[in-house]
Amino acid sequence: MIKVGVIGSGAMGSGIAQVGATAGHAVIIYDTNKSALEKSKSALDTTLKKLVEKQKISEQKASAIFSLITYADDLKSFADCGLVIEAVIENLEVKQKLFSELEDIVKEDCIIASNTSSLSITSIASACKKTNRVLGIHFFNPAPLMPLVEIIPGISTDKNAVEISRKLIDSWGKITVLAKDTPGFIVNRVARSYYGESIRIAEEGIADYVNIDWALKEFGGFKMGPFELMDFIGNDINYKVTETVWEQFFYEQKFKPSFTQKRLFEAKYFGRKTGKGYYDYSEGAENPEPQKNEELGKQIFNRVIAMLINEAIDALYLNVASKEDLDLAMTKGVNYPKGLLKWGDEIGLQNILKTLTALQDEYGEDRYRASVLLKKMVKENKKFFS
Ligand SMILES: NC(=O)c1ccc[n+]([C@@H]2O[C@H](COP(=O)([O-])OP(=O)(O)OC[C@H]3O[C@@H](n4cnc5c(N)ncnc54)[C@H](O)[C@@H]3O)[C@@H](O)[C@H]2O)c1
């Protein structure tokens, strides 16, 4: 079994190391911050004890996982790894510097991956002399619990490196999907309008946060409404992803961030972790209750779901992923109740087109333009899945 290296012992790196060790690999984690390494080790100890208490794993398994992970403060420890996954801060220069150092340390056949959420894999790989073994292996948070992993080849990644990585991550019990190296890959691109369109509805004064959250849970079956979910993810992280995706799409209108989100970010109203976001999480705080207006709720749901389905269709049109992988990504990566393409078939693609056309007529904005593929499918009376 190959040895796995993980760079960065924060939330993602620690989770990825746990997943690798649970699958039986010896794992080394490296971090420049010694206290982050210590924190990672003690958090793993707590997690494993809880899993034993809940009878999810045996005591033997827990101690096996614990002893398979070693903590290093020198990148040279990665010399005999077969795969290294980088999960340091989301900063291109930092990642590029690491990759160029790393390639001189690891073996010839070692695969080097980044867990980046929003940076281009090709740009990270460009720091290396040998770019064909560099790819994206994108886990979701928390890595031990979320089943989806996006596999992203850069422009010069070898097919072989992609196949080996996919097989390996599949053997860890994860569900892998293949995504093109485009901003946000699958999930962080397609999910943008769940937040963006909901904020827009709130900014226009059509409904407030709590009623929009209620509408999407009630009529869409989403586990969390967009505002609850943004507060859960953290408005700092969500805002940064939104901004990066928009910039990387050459300022494409449909991905444009909102002032609402920016102001929350500036005020450090990050959500649950700071006690305040769209909602107030301080002790004894009272948040509003939804009025549950069915007609308005359905309108809100129709508008947001049309935007989401249109984006999934556009991603398919632009070959970001296969239709199967697009639907898997949204159900397994962000827990959507249904795959968006299948959902589009069910609602009726002609209805999605009608909603978008009405929105574009009303607002005259490019963000509501229907995907070429959606128009084509409606014209030819086709469905994505029969
Ligand atoms: N948090 C999420 O929800 C999430 C989900 C998927 C992917 N990601 C991506 O995973 C990566 C890590 O995110 P995170 O949330 O775990 O971050 P984090 O801030 O929790 O951890 C980052 C760690 O990297 C360490 N670090 C910084 N520079 C370093 C360097 N040069 N060498 C070694 N270690 C270094 C820091 O000390 C820190 O411990 C980012 O690229 C992020 O975009 C995050």
Image (cartoon, rainbow, N blue to C red):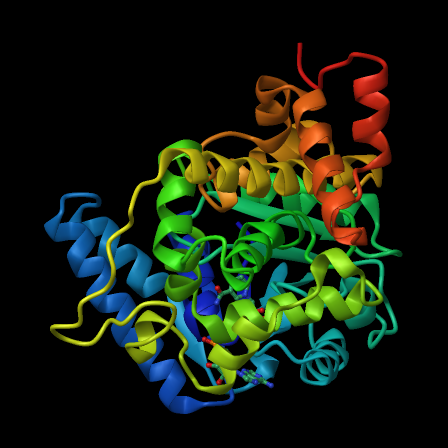
From the viewer's perspective, tell me whether residue 102 is left or right of residue 213. right
Instruction: Measuring from the top left, give residue 236's x and y in whole percent.
Output: 50, 76
Residue 281, quarter of the rendered image: bottom left
Q: Nearer the viewer, residue 11 or 26?
A: 11
* Relative vertical location of residue 29 with respect to residue 51 in this rendering, above or below: below
Q: In the depicted view, which residue is nearer to us: 85 or 286?
A: 286
Residue appearing at x 65%, y 68% in the figure: 257
Where residue 21 sits, quadrant-wise, is bottom left
Observer-nearest of 359 and 179? 359
Q: Is residue 142 visible?
A: no
Q: Residue at x 77, y 13 (%)?
A: 382
Q: Position of residue 131 (x, y in %)?
A: 85, 64
The quadrant in which the C terminus is found is top right
Q: Is residue 378 above or below residue 329?
A: above
Which residue is at 77% across, 60% downward? 253
Looking at the image, is 152 positioned above or below residue 234? above
Residue 233 visible to an observer of this rendering = yes
Q: Residue at x 40, y 72 (%)?
A: 70
